[in-house]
Amino acid sequence: MAQTSMHRFTAALISGALASKVLGFGREILMAQVLGASLVADGFRGAATAVMLPLAFLQNESVPAIMIPMHRDALKDGDGPRRLAALTVALTGIAVILTLIIEALGERWIHVFVGGFTPEGRNLTLDFVRIMALGMPASAMINVLAAGEIALGRTRLTNIRASLLNIAVLMGIALLAMSGNSHTLAWSFAIAFNALGVWGLFTMWREGVLSFRGLTWASVWAAGREFLRRLRPLLALPLAEQGNVWMERALASRITTGAVASLDYARTLTESALLLISQPVGLAVLSSHPPKDPAAQIESIARPILALALPASMFLVMFAPEIVRLVFFRGAFNEQALLLTSGALRGIAVGLWAATLGWILIRILNGAGRNFAAAVIIVTAYTVNIAVNLLTFYILDAGGSGTLLLGLGETVRGIILLAGVVIALDSRRKLLFLIFIASFPAALMALLGWQVHQHFDGTFQRLFAGGVAYMACIALAVALLMPGLYVAAYARVRGVLQV
């Protein structure tokens, strides 16, 4: 993929992620206002985890590293549409089997995930799971079709998927507010996946991107076997990732009612970096051909990410209560929810910059064919996260420190992830130097944030002053890491003045 084409492709992915993020942000604000950190909010999020976790090996973050190259190879052989159809049937079939297992296990499955819930909470979560599981096959199918489109240089399904789900959940929340029936949340979830799955399947078949002509059970079996063969070096990834999710949900369910929801409210604010930067840039890197100068590519990515993300992480740490109060504090979102969510936000934000850069650099390893090294790094990061969560289990409490400690576990994961990738790359010295330089604006942000809290009292006053401080820190970070931008801007202004 040419550099210009890669930039356009990345821009298309970022625009789709931005639309999804805006909708997701609105969804979380509405959910916080209608449900707060309540039993229904916890049950819905616990059910979503219980439903999506079994599909992890079919659609977690490592799967595109397999599906995209598979379809790219099929396109080179001239058999792309039929082989994509075979893979779609194979993985959707596996998802159907998993759905039946989840429906059959029922209450036992729920107890594994949210055993700390009250009996009423577990029963509500079980109701949600039985409905939401109906969307599992469509979810797996959409993931295959989206990977096939990315291999073709398209972003349609990838961009639509999260946005549609957010719109559906928004509708479910609105229906819940009007009717008082919490099950509308679960039905909106299941209907959204199935509707998009049917639309994607029909559209790609009509366009000739997908072809079931001549498809046999042998070809379906071969496609599924090839996927599982390529997945084998990465199989530990979904196990580690979802094991970490399970552990976090299980521990959060034992803190207090609302802790599960509070962690997700906090991630609404922190995942912007992953959704708007890491995923689009990482997919664009993965879909392009390996660069002639990997070190130059890594440096060109690391400089702007560090300049923006390190001060931003410190800003979130310093002003977490004010941000949560401004965004969520209304309706059913009370002081307890504020305390829990602020603690989670602070814990996660400490290492947000590391996770953002780490996930992008992992894609560089994937693109270079170093999948085993990438897998070892990711599994190690999740394993350490699980270990940290287990070590903090006995000091979790019903206040903000409980969610803070779980958030810090995620921070440790991000730091381990980045450290592992830095060690694996040849340009490790340059990366360490860039991180060292970027730490100065971040330290300045911490100092200025402390001063703002000393001299200002109101939420808006603190956020305004903190925002001014953040912009100053960004200006310093850009001067240190990307001085060429100032030189180019000065030359342009001088040229305009001389005309």
Image (tube, helix red, strand yellow):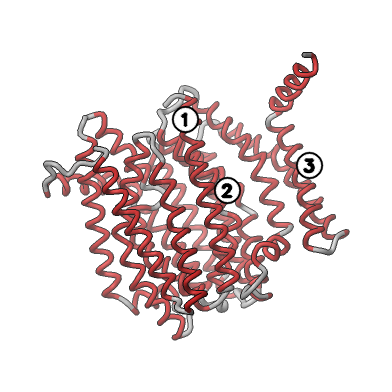
Q: Position of residue 486 (x, y in %)?
A: 73, 27
Secondary element at image label 1:
helix
Task: Please indicate, yes or no, whether residue 232 appears anywhere in the rendered image.
Answer: no
Name which residue lies at 35% across and 45% down: 146
Image quarter (top left, top right, bottom left or bottom right) of the N terminus:
top left
Camera-nearest residue between 98 and 439? 98
Q: Amino acid at mark 1?
A: Met
Q: Is residue 151 left or right of residue 241?
A: left
Instruction: Specify few, some or many for label 3: CA neighbours under 10 Å numbering under 14, 14-19, or 20 or more.
Output: some
Q: Name the N-terminal-most of marks 2 and 1.
A: 1
Name which residue lies at 55% across and 74% down: 35
Q: Name the N-terminal-most of marks 2 and 3.
A: 2
Alpha carbon distance from label 1 to label 3: 31 Å
Question: Which residue, given by chain and number where applicable, does mark 3 sit on?
Answer: 472
Quarter of the figure with residue 317? bottom right
Secondary element at image label 3:
helix
Question: Which residue, given by chain and number where applicable, does mark 2 sit on?
Answer: 273
Task: Please indicate, yes or no, whether residue 298 appears anywhere in the rendered image.
Answer: yes
Secondary element at image label 2:
helix
Q: Amino acid at mark 2?
A: Ala
Question: Which residue, given by chain and number where applicable, does mark 1 sit on?
Answer: 6
Camera-nearest residue between 17 and 3? 17
Q: Residue lying furthest front in this view?
A: 178
Alpha carbon distance from label 2 to label 1: 20 Å
